């Protein structure tokens, strides 16, 4: 029985989840390399908007007027930040949007998988896919062996990322989701601070205005979800 721990009833859904997740990771790294930190973080806040849209087609969920309005507000925010139109700079704005699309699809597939698969198995398959992608990266032309400083920084990314995920899970365990989730928007504040300290990046007015719209949109969607979940038992009882 122990040797069968890796077996799954939904291999193709796992494969799609891993493939899309890897695309999202590559996209966010390209975005972070070519765009200001605050801009990338601002656009990534739009993930709940795309998740709402995907949930309609993939989970057959019903979306009301409030959430559709929130989606519209969020898209306006993204347009303000990215300034549609082809130039040498804003072609890179597509990458954080690809990340949002990938993250949203991953959220939907995890929800589908979690109905039959243990959470640790979902994470295991994705970790293996990242390992395989990392091995293949050795053979990409232009690959550079990291020096000790870079290895230290890469290690810190992995360690701090793992700790952040652990602390986030613990925060959801000991506090209400409605209290914890809005705190993620502090990431924009830290992105602005770190962007200025390390790269002397100063966010533009359009980035701040667009970010505000995206944050408002995400909060509306989130609060609506909490409200609907809270009223569901009452409705079913009636």
Image (cartoon, helix red, strand yellow):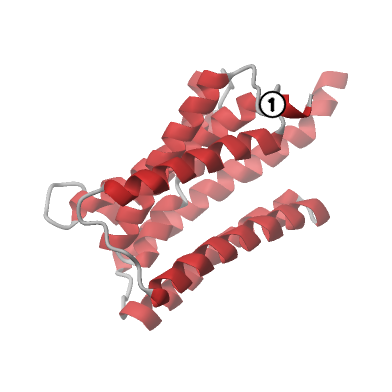
Q: Residue at x 83, y 27 (%)?
A: 233
Q: Residue at x 52, y 65 (%)?
A: 187
Q: Is residue 194 visible?
A: yes
Instruction: Tell me which corner region of the image, top left, top right, bottom left or bottom right, holds residue 35.
Output: bottom left
Give the quarter of the figure containing the C terminus. Answer: top right
Residue marked by disc 1: 117
Q: Taking 178 as reference, is 200 above or below it? A: below
Q: Taking 18 as reference, is 81 above or below it? A: below
- Left or right of 110 on screen, residue 213: left
Instruction: Tell me which corner region of the image, top left, top right, bottom left or bottom right, holds residue 20.
Output: top left
Q: Which residue ends up furthest to the left in the rendered image?
A: 87
Q: Residue 234 in the image: state x and y as whole percent.
A: 84, 27
Q: Residue 67 in the image: state x and y as whole percent.
A: 54, 35
In the foreground, 7 or 94: 7
Q: Which residue ends up furthest to the right in the rendered image?
A: 237
- Left or right of 123 on screen, residue 2: right
- Left or right of 227 on screen, residue 91: left
Q: Residue at x 59, y 18 (%)?
A: 10
Q: Taking 40 as reference, is 18 above or below it? A: above
Q: Residues within 10 Å of mark 1 (few under 14, many from 20)?
A: some
In the foreground, 9 or 89: 9
SS at circle 1: loop
Q: Is residue 72 visible?
A: no
Q: Residue at x 58, y 66 (%)?
A: 160
Give the quarter of the figure containing the N terminus. Answer: top right
């Amino acid at each position: 029985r122990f040797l069968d721990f890796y077996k799954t009833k939904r291999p193709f859904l796992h494969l799609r989840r891993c493939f899309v997740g890897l695309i999202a990771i590559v996209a966010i790294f390209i975005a972070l390399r070519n765009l200001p930190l605050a801009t990338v973080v601002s656009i990534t806040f739009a993930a709940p908007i795309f998740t709402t849209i995907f949930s309609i087609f993939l989970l057959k969920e019903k979306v009301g007027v409030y959430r559709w309005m929130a989606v519209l507000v969020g898209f306006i925010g993204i347009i303000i930040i990215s300034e549609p139109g082809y130039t040498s700079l804003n072609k890179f704005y597509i990458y954080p949007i690809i990340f949002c699309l990938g993250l949203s699809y991953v959220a939907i597939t995890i929800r589908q998988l979690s109905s039959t698969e243990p959470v640790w198995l979902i994470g295991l398959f994705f970790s293996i896919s990242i390992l395989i992608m990392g091995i293949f990266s050795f053979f990409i032309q232009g690959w550079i062996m990291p020096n000790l400083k870079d290895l230290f920084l890469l290690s810190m990314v992995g360690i701090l990322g793992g700790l952040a995920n652990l602390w986030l899970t613990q925060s959801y365990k000991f506090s209400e989701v409605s209290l914890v989730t809005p705190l993620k928007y502090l990431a924009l504040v830290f992105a602005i601070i770190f962007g200025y300290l390390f790269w002397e990046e100063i966010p533009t007015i359009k980035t701040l205005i667009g970010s505000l719209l995206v944050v408002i949109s995400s909060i509306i969607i989130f609060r609506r979800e909490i409200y609907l979940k809270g009223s569901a038992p009452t409705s079913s009882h009636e």
